Amino acid sequence: MLEATRWLLGAGILMWMLAWLGESAIGVNWGTVSFHKLKPSTVVGLLKDNKIPKVKVFEAEADVLKALMGSGIQVMLGIPNEMLPLLSTSPAAADSWLRQNVSAYLGKGGADIRFLSSLLYSIFH
């Protein structure tokens, strides 16, 4: 049963990724690990000024998600690799993570979170 659930989840993620890639638009990756960190509101302003309609956010940080609220920018939100084992085996942990990092930012005037993705290890990791 658990194996079937994992397979369905993987197939669903693949279908979302194909749908995301099938649309023609420019998107950017947004990671927040930096020596010269910009304010999230500044980054969202730059994205809007440059008509960038999609962004993949690598970390579910509250200030980043708040800045994306009401922006009209489609968001793919990354789930940290180290959380995948826990989230894939504990429905309670998955529910808590979703409530804290997704549901809290949805709704009228909220962030347009369309997809969740895991962050892939680099081949050098």
Image (tube, helix red, strand yellow):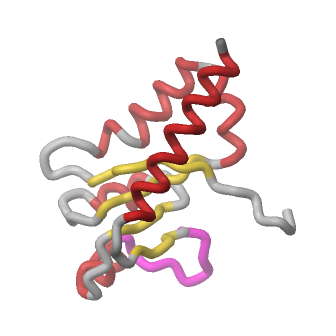
Nearer to us in this view, 57 or 118: 118
The percent coordinates of residue 97 (x first, y second) are 49, 34
Q: Range of the magenta residues? A: 32-40
Residue at the image position 34 percent from the left and 51 percent from the top: 113
- In the picture, measured across the screen, residue 11 lies left or right of residue 26, that is right
The percent coordinates of residue 101 (x first, y second) are 43, 42
Residue at the image position 60 percent from the left and 49 percent from the top: 118
Residue 98 versus residue 108 in the image, above or below: above
- In the picture, measured across the screen, residue 44 lies left or right of residue 96, that is left
Which corner quadrant holds the N terminus?
Answer: top right
The percent coordinates of residue 48 (x first, y second) are 25, 79
Nearer to us in this view, 11 or 50: 11
- In the picture, measured across the screen, residue 113 lies left or right of residue 72, that is right
> Which of the 4 image quadrants contains residue 68?
bottom left
Q: Residue furthest right?
A: 124
> Which of the 4 image quadrants contains residue 46?
bottom left
Q: Residue furthest top?
A: 1
Which corner quadrant holds the C terminus?
Answer: bottom right
> Which of the 4 image quadrants contains residue 52?
bottom left
The percent coordinates of residue 79 (x first, y second) are 57, 47
Residue 84 versus residue 5 in the image, above or below: below
Residue 33 versus residue 113 in the image, above or below: below
Residue at the image position 34 percent from the left and 75 percent from the top: 25
